[in-house]
Image (cartoon, rainbow, N blue to C red):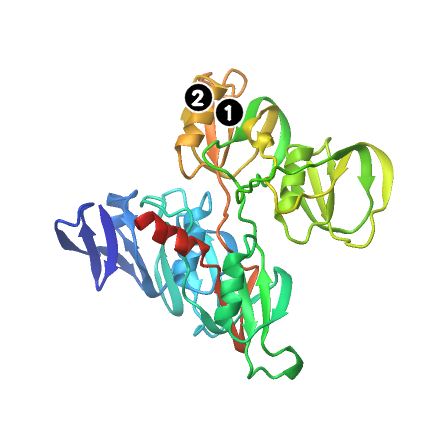
Amino acid sequence: YTLFPHGSGFLFIDSNLNYFFSIPLFSCICGNLFLPLLLFLLPSACIRGFLENVDFPGSDIANLFSPSAEHCQELCSQHPSCLFFSFNRPDKSSGSFQCSLKSSTSGHPRAQVLQLGVTSGYSLKPCNLDLTPCFQQVFEDVDFSGGDYRTFFTVSFEECQRVCTQDPVCQFFTYITGNFTTSNIRYKCHLKFSWYVPRPPAIVLKAGVISGFSQNSQLTQHFDTVCQSQLFSDTDFRGSDFLELKAVSAEHCQFLCSVHPQCTYFSFSRIDFRCFLKNNPNNIMTRAKSGVTSGIPTHLCQIDESWARLTYSGVDFSGSDISFEVVNSTDQCQEKCTENPNCQFYTYHNGSLIFSDHRPRCYMKRVITMPAPPKVKKLDNVVSGFTLRNCRSAEKAQD
């Protein structure tokens, strides 16, 4: 069943849309606090739609930026721990475009507060979640600040969006219109990047565990030509760092560098799984350094993804859990992760040293991979929006 916030209650609709009926919103009212008892009765219900001018105070686990309640809801749905959210709309007096992701042990908000300019709602995890959501709306007088990797001049935001859609690494854009105050940057299109591939945020050595990745699908665009690559062992490419990530191997680090449009080369520290992405298109400064492997990204060819088919003994992909199951082996854990469309990577725990019942567990994990601007703010005479690649993929799937 699916619940839709509606008036003073919820519409209750069965999976085949054969019938629906309305359920009143039973509440405990204490001053301006509303505790919907309905959520206690149906903790795993699919709740679509939004509660306008309602805030879910507290319980924050992450604060991101978003241009709309729909986008904020999708961020919550892809975040491993988010169960509900509150979004500050542009009409809120302060803190506009903030998307507050929230969670609680009970699985629902501890309170609802009337708050002008705030829209709240629930994660779509219990629904049939679209892992590649389509965002067709464009946002006038809104700037997606940051993430820039390429700029050019063009006649309209439609053309800017078209180029973004054709560029496989472009996730969103901001276009400066002909009415912008500064005349010398009018008609400028800014293509922008955010991570669209899975990347464990924490990787540590740990006894009794084995980690790996879902085998569900190819991670990047397919090319007929296979990439040729070379790694330089015990070599550090000095300086020019712009981003540090975690990677499970040098090959994984090379993959991350190849995906990021600003990465010109990288260095990987085997001791602590640190992957340093670097940007210097003019020169490479090298030095010998034990335990460090460096390399150059690949371009417009089929990237080697063999690292994602391996398992890593004694390595823990810490955090980002979405669920766990009791399993009998690493192979079964990988199968469970691959079968689960929400699972991107996993860690298998040998229960003998960790759990009192000595039963091994498979922890399935994920991170946000949808387009996510690092900052959203008001700015007159600009237009921002997203790539339409996912929209076209959805249209092909329906044909």
Q: As drawn, is 26 to the left or to the right of 71?
A: left
Q: Is residue 73 above or below residue 157?
A: above
Q: Is the Cβ of the residue at disc 2 closer than 8 Å to that at disc 1?
A: no
Whether residue 7 appears in this view of the structure is: yes
Residue at image point 57% right, 73% down:
154
Q: Amino acid at mark 2?
A: Gln
What x and y, as percent, mark residue 232? Answer: 78, 34
Mark 2: few/some/many CA within 10 Å (<14, 14-19, 20+): some
Quarter placement of the N terminus: top left
Q: Which residue is mark 2?
A: 332
What x and y, as percent, mark residue 87? Answer: 43, 62
Q: Secondary structure at mark 1?
A: strand
Q: Is residue 77 above or below residue 320?
A: below
Q: Amino acid at mark 1?
A: Tyr
Closer-to-camera residue (82/343): 343
Whether residue 32 appears in this view of the structure is: no
Closer-to-camera residue (91/296): 296
Mark 1: few/some/many CA within 10 Å (<14, 14-19, 20+): many
Work out how far the residue at label 2 is from the one at label 1, CA to CA, in angstroms. 9 Å
Q: Secondary structure at mark 2?
A: helix
Residue that lies at the very extreme toward the front in this rendered image: 224
Disc marking residue 348: 1
Place residue 112 in its image quadrant: bottom left
What x and y, as percent, mark residue 81? Answer: 45, 44
